[in-house]
Image (cartoon, helix red, strand yellow):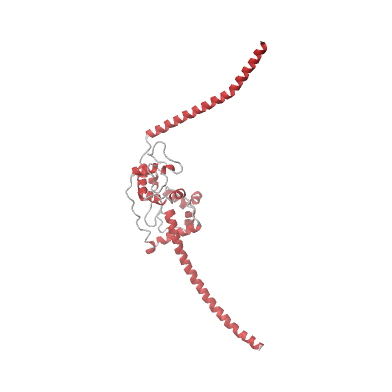
Amino acid sequence: MTGDQSSGFREARPVTRIRVGRVSLAHLVGVAAFALLSTYATGIARADDGSTIFAAKCAACHTIGKGKTVGPDLKGITTTESPTFLAKWVAAPSVLIKAGDPKATKLVKQYPLQMPDLGLSPGDVSAVLAYIAQQSGSGAAASGAGAPAAALPPGDAAAGRELFVGGTRMHNGGPPCMSCHSISGIGALGGGTLGPDLTDAYRKYGGTAGLESFLQSVPTPTMSAVWTRQPLTPQEVANLTAFVQEGAVSQRSLDAIWKLLLLAAIGLIILVAIAATYWRRRLLGVRKPLVQRANLLFNRKAARRS
């Protein structure tokens, strides 16, 4: 009986091996199919994530198939440039610029507004590049890239000036531009110094289309932190653009310069008066005890003589 059992097991082993082999082959085929589907799905997911990132970080300065604005048109960029350069440029353009990379140097010369570091993770960079590659193709996947942007209402430069200096409140509660920026034509004292002077911003951002796109997306980290929750309305964007355009051709008047000089002179006089008063009191505080001591000694001597 023992011999029959062992004989039975000897016969069963080849059958088991054959079944295991068949199962393994089917398993491998299933894994390969799953891997292909996962890769395809991951590519779509990355492109979807890249759409959100592109809208928030890139759309203010770039288009995909609609021409140059502040920066170059990115259609087909993933096929004309090396993936390594694109990944480094999107992640940290300042590093390539400081290193003197020829392509980075060429971009800086061609486009005066330098691309800022956007703080994107490696995953974000891959997603953005996947989205650009998807939108650069033909057919339905790229149909949205060439869709015309919604036209803004006509801008009013006078209304834009009031928004800039804070004479009119922003509809969604944002702060006036003057708190961080200055521009010609807003008075003798100018504006804030946290952000750059915007007198030449209309040219730097590529005219009306570029500046409107920038104000609608506010991709820089500082502006994004302020304006993401308090976005400008389309009419405010149009009005501010018109005012900044007007500022590109206006200069600070001589009256404003004389006012600044007068204010500086008044301030200097006030500082000198305060310093003189303080110094005089300081001298009196030192001299008074000396005079009192001298009088006391004189009185004592006079008392002894008498």
The quarter of the displayed image where residue 199 is located: top left
Image quarter hosting the C terminus: top right
Q: Position of residue 293 (x, y in %)?
A: 63, 20
Which residue is pictured at 67% across the width and 13% down the height? 304
Answer whether residue 94 is visible to the viewer in this image.
yes
Q: Residue at x 51, y 76 (%)?
A: 26
Report whether 210 appears left or right of 306.
left
Q: Quadrant of the N terminus?
A: bottom right
Residue 80 visible in the snapshot: no
- Which percent across, then down, holds residue 41? 46, 66
User: Residue farthest to the left?
Assistant: 154
Instruction: Tell me residue 289's x, y (percent).
Output: 60, 22
Q: In this view of the protein, which residue sits in the foreground, 53 or 207?
A: 53
- Observer-nearest residue: 300 or 286? 300
Task: Judge whether 10 appears above or below 162 on screen.
Answer: below
Nearer-the-camera pick, 31 or 284: 284
Q: How many marks?
A: 0
Can you give x and y, in whole percent of width and height, for residue 65 in the image? 38, 57
Q: Residue at x 64, y 17 (%)?
A: 297
Question: Residue extending furthest right?
Answer: 304
Q: Is residue 44 above or below residue 59?
A: below
